[in-house]
Image (cartoon, helix red, strand yellow):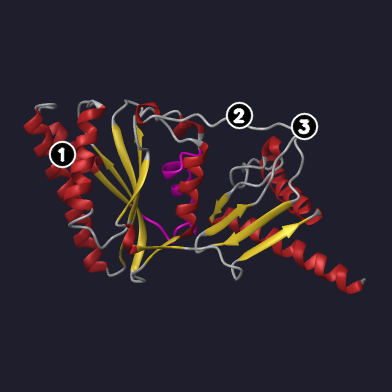
Amino acid sequence: MYSIPKTAAFRLTESGIIVSGQTITNSGGFAPGDRWEREKGDITGLSSASRLRLRKLLASSRPVDGNLQPWGCCLTIPGEVLSQDVARGIWYDWINNYATKKYKMYPQIWRVELQRRRQAHWHVLIWLPKQTVSLALLRVSFADDWRRLVRKKLSKDGSMPWSEKTDYGFETFGVRFKRLKSVGEGSANYLAPELDHESKRKQEQHGWIGRQWGVLNRQRLIIGEETEHNTVRLAGSIVGQIIGDFKTIQERRRASGRGYVGAGVGKHWRLPSVLFGRDADVLERVVRDRLAMTNSKEKQA
């Protein structure tokens, strides 16, 4: 039986809300065991700690250059399924010779997954220019460079014979861009399932050995810090009331067939640690309403 946290801190970021300080203990005095030390070869999916770091990074990052806007990009290798060693070589070559050199002005957050056919591909959150002409040229250049690199690597390696079918695959699936409004706003559907692997279907596509995600051109990103200005720390019954309100909204959404808001409170009676877009808006409204009600009662008293 889990208890409801008595403390919580709500940090409003550029893209969502980060919730911290929720202490969970059960009636039996459960204490977690020693953390298992993971080796690189053991990593075939996102641990809860790594997933939380990724979600916090997504929620609190914005580009140094205000003239950039976020895009979702998927990089795929059409054709025969490659070994992970070959696919990893292609990805590292892309990072070292293109992503951090030719495209060094554009910050990127990447996430690897295995397709259903077990071919590796990468989801990238990248900030690109808002100007129409520059944006169009960059997208074309990005796609051409990816295709040229993969073709060169595979032809040299002899891993996959090139064909018209492979060329067609690159034209259709090689590089796909999706415009996002802002990280979190209007893009939660991209961030949660694609980069964070929130859905069950995405979690089943784990199996990549080694690092699952990373940041490129970090110096071009501003990662928001926690300050008293953007953080509200609460304690006592109001925390339980906020959790209860949020859970009620989730139950209503589920009853109407629209599913849960966010990752869900679940049996542990705690809030998700990071929320984006509409999910963050819902929690922010709940917190503000509860604070207003509390302040009103205190004034009346």
Mark 1 residue type? Val
Question: How far across and how far down the image is residue 276, in percent?
Answer: 53, 54
Q: Do we see residue 164 in this rendering?
A: yes
Q: Read off the residue under disc 1.
A: 150
* Magenta-colored stretch includes residue 183: yes
Q: Read off the residue under disc 3.
A: 1
Along the horizontal axis of the image, is 239 left or right of 225? right
Q: Quadrant of the N terminus?
A: top right
Question: How far across and how far down the image is residue 264, in percent?
Answer: 63, 42
Q: Secondary structure at mark 2?
A: loop
Q: Quadrant of the C terminus?
A: bottom right
Which residue is painted at 72% across and 41% down in the image?
269
Mark 2 residue type? Gly
Question: Residue 33's mark?
Answer: 2
Q: Earlier in the sequence, mark 2 or mark 3?
A: 3
Magenta region, residue range? 178-198
- Using a 10 Å C-alpha cutoff, classify the residue at mark 1 as few (fewer than 14 neighbours), some (14 to 19) or many (20 or more): many
Q: CA distance from mark 2 to mark 3?
A: 19 Å
On screen, residue 237 above or below 222: above
Which residue is farthest front? 34
* Magenta-colored stretch includes residue 51: no
